[in-house]
Structure formats: structure tokens, C-alpha cells
Image: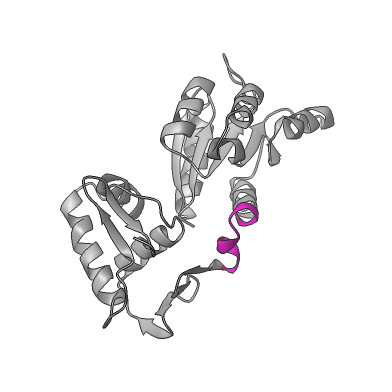
Amino acid sequence: MGVRVLVVDDDPTVAEVVGDYLRNAGMESRHAADGHTALRLAGTWRPDLVVLDVMMPGIDGLEVCRRLRDVRGEQALLPVIMLTALGEESDRVLGLETGADDYVTKPFSPRELIARVGAVMRRVRPALAGEMLTYGDIEMDVDAHRVRRNGRSVQLGPTEFRLLRHLMENPGRVFSRERLLDSIWPRDRDIDARTVDVHVRRLRKALNQGDEKDVVRTVRSAGYSLDMEG
């Protein structure tokens, strides 16, 4: 999916299990052990969704959700799934009234949680539905692993496919080389930033034929973006 999920839980075991399942499902994951860290990462890392434990010391999950909803801009629309041991109906209602989009009680099935994450993201990012992505004249069938531009087939290697998919799920957003390394090569510590440039060149060569516009924009000192208008 290329979805960035912030897991907020003071239990490191729960956070590790959830993070592993998210990464196995093709998502990015970061962990915040308290509310203060969660609010900071929501502004700096800019996740697509937050899995938020309610019972935490200091700022609890309900207060974190309230503060996210009180700010202006993208954070106010950030999807939140509450994760808590509280199972009473009144607790669930309170979480939803605070602004949560969904509610999962502990103990929970990690697979169910991942399914809930996917369902929420399909509601807020319809392009994920059916795993068919489009941007301008570029179409990507994620399930069939096929890409077309202006009706012609685009042949991509696995890495270039993942790179394009990540960019198509976040059009217009500028990603540094380091951020792309974390997203495309999350477990390969031997890869350096120059590798990103190599694969971007390969992606451009495959995407751009004849007089077709180069949609992969290089942002000086910042990184790369998929930008039809750039």
C-alpha cells in the first residue's frame, strides 16, 4: 500500500508485533511510546494513519486524538484507529466521539487490525480501492504488476515498480533520497543514497518515450516528486 502508520502504544511488545504485521503488509511503520512523541511525529513524519492506544501515562490516547482534531490542516483529517483494553460500549462511543475512525479492543488479532487499517485507508484514499492507481496518463495495476502510459505497456523491474507505486500513492509530495531508501529498501542497510538516483534514472527511461513529459521531478537539495505540472 505504501501507507505510513504511526503506532502509539507504551507497551513495546504490542508495538513491535503491530509494526511487524504492518511492514509485512507493505506499509511503513514508526512507534511512539507516549502522547508527546505521537503529536511530534504526527507533525514531522506525517503519517497517513495512527493506531492509537488509549491507556497511556501522561497524555492518554483520547487527549492525543482531541489535539489532532483541534489543529488545522492535514493533521485534523488524519485517520485514527483506537487500540485499547477497554471494551465497554461507553468507552467505544467516547473514542469515536473524540474523533477516532475505528476502534479495536485488546486482545486483538493483528490480521484484523491490518484489515481495519486497509479499510480505513480505502475510505480516505479511494485510489487504493481495487489496487488500481492512476496519475495523469499513467495507470498501475498493482495486483497484476502492470504499468501503462498513454495506452502503451511500460516494462519495469521490481525496484522501479515499487518506486513508482510509492510516488503514485503520494503525487506531488517530495521525498528525500533517505526517505525513499527507508520506503523502498527498508531492510537493506548496505544501500546508499546514490542507489536511489540510479533507479530513478531507470524509471524515467522506462516511463518517458519520444516527446512524453518527464513526470519525475528532481527538487534540488530535496529529492524527487511525481509531478505532472512540474
- The answer to whether any part of residue 186 appears in the image is no
Of the 4 image quadrants, the one containing the C terminus is: bottom left
Q: Residue at x 73, y 27 (%)?
A: 86
Residue at image point 30% right, 72% down: 157
Q: Nearer the viewer, residue 147 or 103?
A: 147
Q: Against 48, is 8 above or below? A: above
- Check the image and name the residue furthest to the bottom: 152
Q: Is residue 196 left or right of residue 48?
A: left
Q: How is the image coloured?
A: one colour
Side (left or right) of 107 relative to 89: left
Residue furthest out toward the front: 229
Which quarter of the figure has residue 90?
A: top right
* Region in magenta: 122-130
Pick the front one: 29 or 201: 201
Query: Is 8 located above or below residue 141 in the figure?
Result: above
The image position of residue 112, as x and y in percent, is: 64, 49
Q: Count numbered badges in the picture.
A: 0
Residue 228 visible in the displayed image: yes
Vertical placement of residue 81 versus 208, above or below: above
Q: Residue at x 46, y 51 (%)?
A: 27
- Quadrant hosting residue 226: bottom left
Question: Picture coordinates of residue 79 (x, y %)?
Answer: 61, 42
In percent of the image, x 54 and y 67: which residue is there? 131
Relative to residue 137, is residue 167 depicted above or below? above
| Residue 161 image offset from top left, x and y in percent | 36, 68
59 relative position to 196: left or right: right
The answer to whether residue 51 is magenta is no
Residue 148 rendering spot, x and y as whole percentages: 42, 79
- 118 sits left or right of 181 in the view: right
Judged from this view, the residue extending furthest toward the right is 89
